Amino acid sequence: MAKVIVVTSGKGGVGKTTSTAALGAALAQRNEKTVVVDFDVGLRNLDLVMGAERRVVYDIVNVIQGDAKLPQALIRDKRLETLFLLPASQTRDKDALTPEGVERVMADLKRHFDWIICDSPAGIERGATLAMRHADVAVIVTNPEVSSVRDSDRIIGLLDSKTARAEIGERIEKHLLLTRYDAQRAERGDMLKVDDVLEILSIPLLGIVPESSDVLRASNLGSPVTLADARSAPALAYLDAARRLAGETVPITIPNEKRGILGKIFGRRAA
Amino acid sequence: MTKVLTDTRSIRIKGRSFLALVLSPEQPIDDWLLRLDDLAKRSAGFFLERPVVLDVADLEIDRKQLRHLIDELANRNVRIMGIEGGRPSLFEPGMPPAMKGGRPASDVEMPSPDASGAPAGGGDSTAASAKAEVPTVRAVPSIVIREPVRSGQSVIFPEGDVTVVGSVASGAEIIAGGSVHIYGTLRGRALAGSVGNAAARIFCRKLEAELLAIDGVYKTADDMAPNLRGQAVQLWLEGDSIMAERLM
């Protein structure tokens, strides 16, 4: 049974695309057929992070408008044969996405894949609401700072009212992915602490990804961080988060915590 | 260029509900106007001094026809204070404002044909019967919200109290005709007694609010005593100032 995940945040630049690519690659490594879908029509980036920008022929807008068949637009990853990308169009804008078209594409993808991961554009307009529309699970990417937290809160409200599941009275599963976390700066008070964010958003925690230059390096290489260097701290955090998404119970660790030994396991339970 | 405000008294802004007559014209409009004339003949001044809202939801008319209808009504001394159920394209500058969110009230009694020949005293009694409402004891309504109120959401309940079991996020708002009770952290806005109720109060388990208002008197976060932040607090109105006290 296919599961549709939307990676969303409200605010831009918090790490949605990076997280989509990293989680997609991590799930595909479990030998489950995974597709990452770029909904950021007009400002596409997922193709770059996945290292597939030179192989894009058709995109999601072509599929929606009937100019191409879905298999023609899907790009298979060169490193993992279970990983696919459905790119967005760079020359169009969000109005090219129609609710009926998106519904058709999602239904089609559900027949072929185990995991469908939708990379939402920033904002709360058409692109973002269509990306979340058919999701079963939402991953809310949040940075430990107040504006990101408030935007995430806004998005959670929309997930509970504007999604297909919400409209038939069901709840969408929501998980918090805290990115760009720096334990020392949180300790100094320059950043919100994990508990502060959890207290404000009151949704279960999927993982904490540390601020790291490995993320930027992997993006520039055109590789999801979980594939570029699977032993780096952010990669480990994403791999654990993917296991939690798949239903495993993995204790949450706060990366780079200087108190006590490195990688100290806290009593916090995963979602 | 900054203006310095020397008068520190706050401006009161309140919501209030009034009973208005709602006229729902039927097509063809000319026939309906004839029937209206007939009604006006039987009881002169029925619409005089009364607020009238025009309900155009069931009408298929364009802007010109609506303009014509409003003018025809004005000729009959029916002054329209608002238009309900109209598409945005129907409106033009100078028309009464669009109204929405109206709640049905008891039907207004029409003047009966017998009253037409009655002396002035009889006319008064019809008006009185139209206004008379059977006084019934009703429980004060309230609503309970069992989940956090998220940023961008607003809970508006002019009928009575609002209780939230959870937090109210920054950028969210609770507007209650009665009191507001938050069993969680209040980070957003809470407006109690919004339709004019100076006895309304605000209670919260942890105060981090952006704005608080009771009966139109408001306070922003900057005006609040710093020692109340993060505390369990109740707020009420004394005269024109919001009082606060920590709850044990």
Image: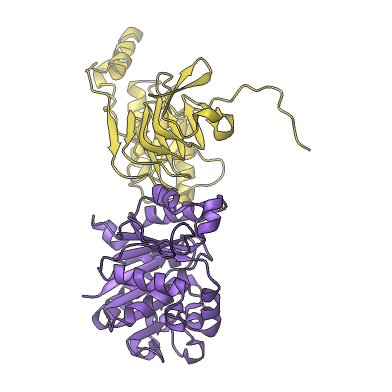
Counting from the top left corner in percent of width and height, residue A265 is at 36, 61
Counting from the top left corner in percent of width and height, residue A108 is at 28, 80
Q: Which chain is purple?
A: A
Q: Residue furthest front?
A: A261
Residue B199 vs A97, above or below: the answer is above
Left or right, residue A99 beside residue A95: left
Residue in front for this viewpoint, B177 or B68:
B177
- Inspect this view and state whether residue B246 appears: yes
Q: Which chain is yellow?
A: B
Left or right, residue B144 beside residue B239: left
Which residue is located at x 49 percent, y 49 percent?
B64
Which residue is located at x 65 percent, y 23 percent?
B8
Residue in front for this viewpoint, A75 or A214:
A214
Counting from the top left corner in percent of width and height, residue A170 is at 23, 57
Residue A98 vs B247, above or below: the answer is below
Q: In the rendered image, which quarter contains the N terminus of chain B?
A: top right
Residue in front for this viewpoint, B59 or A148:
A148
- Inspect this view and state whether residue A91 appears: no
Residue A110 vs B200, above or below: the answer is below
Left or right, residue B129 beside residue A234: left
